Image (cartoon, grey):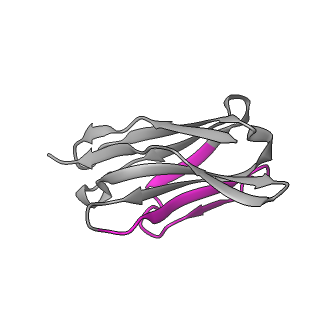
Amino acid sequence: QVHVVESGGGLVQPGGSLRLSCAASGFTSRIYGMSWYRQAPGKERELVASISIPSAIKNYADSAKGRFTISRDNAKNTVYLQMNSLKPEDTAVYYCKAGVLLPSGRSDYWGQGTQVTVSS
């Protein structure tokens, strides 16, 4: 079992920055990757960025490239999403997902989400 908790969302003006955090607990040694997704009202949940563990290979959605940076702190079992040059279209609930490899196979564990609102 892995527990995932996001934090760091809030209200920010266009052009501003936010840093989201995703803290994992439980069987963290079994996590092979962590990802940030987002879901705007009336839209499907979409992948924003991911990072593999332990290789730290990063992938970004086109909408995030050049503006967002995913990183991790192994000692804290925490993944971050630094978001710069935010736009109103970045407004969404941001979710963190941990991909876990169990003896029974792969499972995903999601956090409860954190709201990001970009508005003047």
Asked if 95 appears above or below 11 in the picture, the reply is below
114, 48: nearer the viewer: 114
Quarter-of-image position of residue 77: top right
Residue 17 in sight from this viewpoint: yes
Residue lying at the far right of the rendered structure: 103
Magenta-drawn stretch contains 59:
yes
Quadrant for residue 1, please give it.
top right
Residue with the most extreme left position: 120
**Residue at the image point whose x is 46% and y is 40% from the top:** 20
Residue at the limit of the structure toward the top, as seen here: 76
Front-lying residue, 1 or 113: 1
Percent coordinates x, y for residue 89 in the rendering? 27, 61
Identity of the residue drawn at 44% across and 39% down = 19
Task: Report whether 112 appears left or right of 75.
Answer: left
Task: Please indicate whether residue 13 sits to the left or right of residue 81 in the image.
Answer: left
Residue 25 in picture, x, y percent from top left: 66, 33
Is residue 2 depicted above or below 62 in this figure?
above
- In the displayed structure, would residue 118 be above or below residue 76? below
At horizontal 30% and vertical 37% (from top left) the residue drawn is 10
Q: Quadrant of residue 72?
A: top right
The image shows residue 49 at horizontal and vertical percentages of 54, 58
For the image, the number of numbered tags is 0
Q: Is residue 45 magenta?
A: yes
Q: Of 95 and 112, which appears nearest the observer?
A: 112
Magenta range is 43-71
